[in-house]
Image: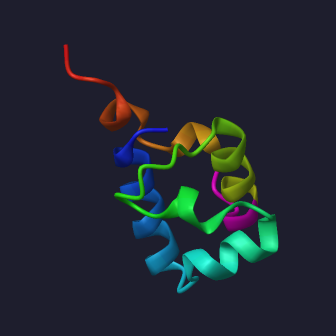
Amino acid sequence: MREQAKKWLAEQLEENRISAECLADVLGIPAKRLCVGSGEMMEADDLLRICAFLCIRPESIPMQSFESPS
């Protein structure tokens, strides 16, 4: 996923007072994938697992902000 998705995720984690490292440990996702600017791609499956953990409905994610500019 693009950096916009990671920025959105960082906001959600901050709002829920959860560290990226803690989330990575609990879900078994490499912490580097969750960090903005790491160069690591976050997979869609990772994002869905994170949504389930945070009790966020995936359809509520503002995906239009993740699209590439035309």
Front position in the image: 25 or 4: 25
**Residue farthest to the bottom, as pictured:** 17
The spot of residue 5 in percent (x, y) is 43, 47
Q: How many marks?
A: 0
State which region is magenta.
53-57
The spot of residue 47 in percent (x, y) is 63, 48
Q: Is residue 5 above or below residue 67?
A: below
Q: Is residue 45 above or below residue 31?
A: above
Left or right of residue 5, residue 31 in this image: right
**Which of the 4 image quarters holds residue 22?**
bottom right
The spot of residue 54 in percent (x, y) is 67, 66
Q: Residue at x 53, y 86 (%)?
A: 17
On the rendered image, what quadrant is the C terminus found in?
top left
Q: Residue at x 45, y 79 (%)?
A: 14
Q: Is residue 27 above or below residue 15?
A: above
The spot of residue 48 in percent (x, y) is 70, 45
**Residue farthest to the front, as pictured:** 39
Query: What is the chief secondary structure element of the magenta stretch?
Result: loop
Q: Residue at x 21, y 22 (%)?
A: 69
**Which of the 4 image quarters holds residue 43?**
top right
**Residue farthest to the top, as pictured:** 70
> Colour scheme in the image?
rainbow
**Which of the 4 image quarters holds residue 7?**
bottom left
Left or right of residue 30, residue 13 in this image: left
Q: Residue at x 34, y 58 (%)?
A: 37
Front position in the image: 41 or 58: 41
Query: Residue 69 lies in magenta, yes or no?
Result: no
Q: Is residue 40 above or below residue 45?
A: below
